Amino acid sequence: MEAVRKSSGTVGKALSVLDLVASFERPVRFNDVLEVSPYPKATLYRILQNLVTEGVLTFDREWQTYALGVRLVRLAHSAWTQSSLAPVARPHLTALSRATGETIHLAQLDGPHVLYLDKLDAKRRVNMFSEAGKVGPAYCTGVGKAMLAHLPPDELDRMLPQQSYHRFTPSTICSQQELTDELHQIREDGFALDREDHEPGIICVAVPVLSRTRQLMGAISVTSTSARTSLGKLKKFVPDLQDAATQVAAAAEYWRFPDNQGTPETMEI
Amino acid sequence: MEAVRKSSGTVGKALSVLDLVASFERPVRFNDVLEVSPYPKATLYRILQNLVTEGVLTFDREWQTYALGVRLVRLAHSAWTQSSLAPVARPHLTALSRATGETIHLAQLDGPHVLYLDKLDAKRRVNMFSEAGKVGPAYCTGVGKAMLAHLPPDELDRMLPQQSYHRFTPSTICSQQELTDELHQIREDGFALDREDHEPGIICVAVPVLSRTRQLMGAISVTSTSARTSLGKLKKFVPDLQDAATQVAAAAEYWRFPDNQGTPETMEI
DNA sequence: CCTTTGAGTTCCGAATAATGAAACTATAAT
DNA sequence: ATTATAGTTTCATTATTCGGAACTCAAAGG
């Protein structure tokens, strides 16, 4: 279980409790949450009750368990739909998937993590919340490294120490220095490689999605297995990927501001 | 724009503002929100700021617009995954989809509305209003009517006046009395029909998913077009649907037992 | 050039909600 | 009967939120 920090505002506290419930991957009893929460019993109790009455948590009377509520699914649908990238990227990702015959990912940064917004299997289209919404590490995935490499220096400096540098495979990058070096290379090349960094047998090539002003919007990748193909062959898709990234960026910028031809920006806090 | 109610707790207020932002289907300026919000300027301003620092809203500096943040997508993934129904229903829905060759929906009630949790397209592509996370009316959809019909009387009494009874097509049910009658029939039959109630040309047959104790858990449906098939032919799928519903309910209840909990899906992306 | 207008932001005393130790209930285990 | 465990309620204290009003800033109008 990850460390849990008290958030300042009332809303922050409530959201941190929501995250806590989410971090279990099953319905949880009050005490399960209490054990990992920084709040005293009564406080946690009240927060949970609030969240339940707001419909953002559900409480199962029979089992006395809390679980995330459907209101979140509704909100996330709106979030996904009104996010500038995901909906407009779909057709371009589909095209990429057909052209390459491999799995395509669309991701954005969520703090120091990679958040997958879409995934297209060569064979079947994948439903939204079963795959989209997953998070992964940034320092050892193709999309993650592609995005880190194109972050403004100050933001990168905040992200680098927050990476876990856990060794998943023999080829995982395990230190900030190694990562910094690789990011430099990626910036030069214009694409990032996943050399089975995260999962044995899984390789991928990724490019950032950059706005016209070269601000980071996200990343897309072609993923395959080392059994089926090689990094050398995957690299052949780089021009296709870069085309797609450019088109996605253009479409996203156009979509958000259809009546304007100024220079749009990525979203920031 | 729907009526907006002041929520009591601090969290409730924040969530209501979040809903407000979601109800626009594009990034919004401060004043856009202010116009439809029940809160004074300074209050709304502070709530929005909190939501942005919590990462649940994003603020675009250049365009001065707010949009829902990716943190919600992450939370919704957890919600979908840990909801007892959606993940365990997948295999059964896939089977149904193969058996029928038609589109399958899984839905739950979210207040007075229908919330779609999953959708499996048949090979043939049907254009219609539904995706995971989308909401629809309960009084004029197959899944909606199937669920309303199996609600406890007191809950039903709360839901019925909250329906909009808007006439989408000539065959839409437009009054509470008509709906009550139809629900009675549905309870007798054990299945609900959508006779192009909501969208012209779209027909469907739906059954509730009920727990052992006959508590409502959700609904599943087979949807098609009146061009391709007929209600009579769709009714032939009722036994399959009911089998699937029973199995989904059993699987969901089994999965809820704390002892038997494991992830029904692979966690790989 | 000055004034007006309206969106967005900040201030701060008053109003409100959140806090959490402790007491309490309910149920199960010894 | 006793102890332990999980969950719930109370209430005086404390911290946060509220929101009217005053402010900044930039653009529009005279």
Image (tube, coloured by chain):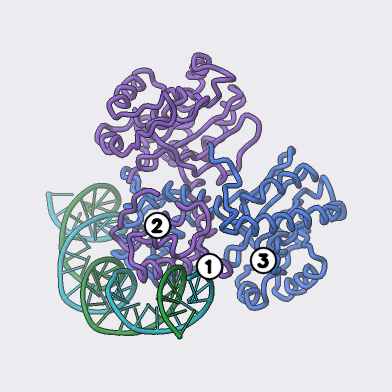
Chain colours: A purple, B blue, C cyan, D green
Q: Where residue B216 is drawn, which disc sits there?
A: 3
Amino acid type at circle 3 is Leu
Q: Is residue A199 above or below residue B232?
A: above
Q: Nearer the viewer, mark 2 or mark 1?
A: 1
| Camera-side residue of D1 and B246 | D1
- Mark 2–mark 3 distance (CA, rounded to whole Å): 39 Å
- Mark 2–mark 1 distance (CA, rounded to whole Å): 41 Å
Disc 3 secondary structure class: strand
Which chain is indicated by disc 3?
B
Q: Nearer the viewer, mark 1 or mark 3?
A: 1
Q: Which residue is mark 1?
A: A64
Which chain is indicated by disc 1?
A
Which chain is indicated by disc 2?
B
Q: Where residue A130 is drawn, which disc sits there?
A: none
Disc 1 secondary structure class: loop
Q: Residues within 10 Å of mark 3 (few under 14, many from 20)?
A: many
Q: Residue at x 46, y 59 (%)?
A: B19
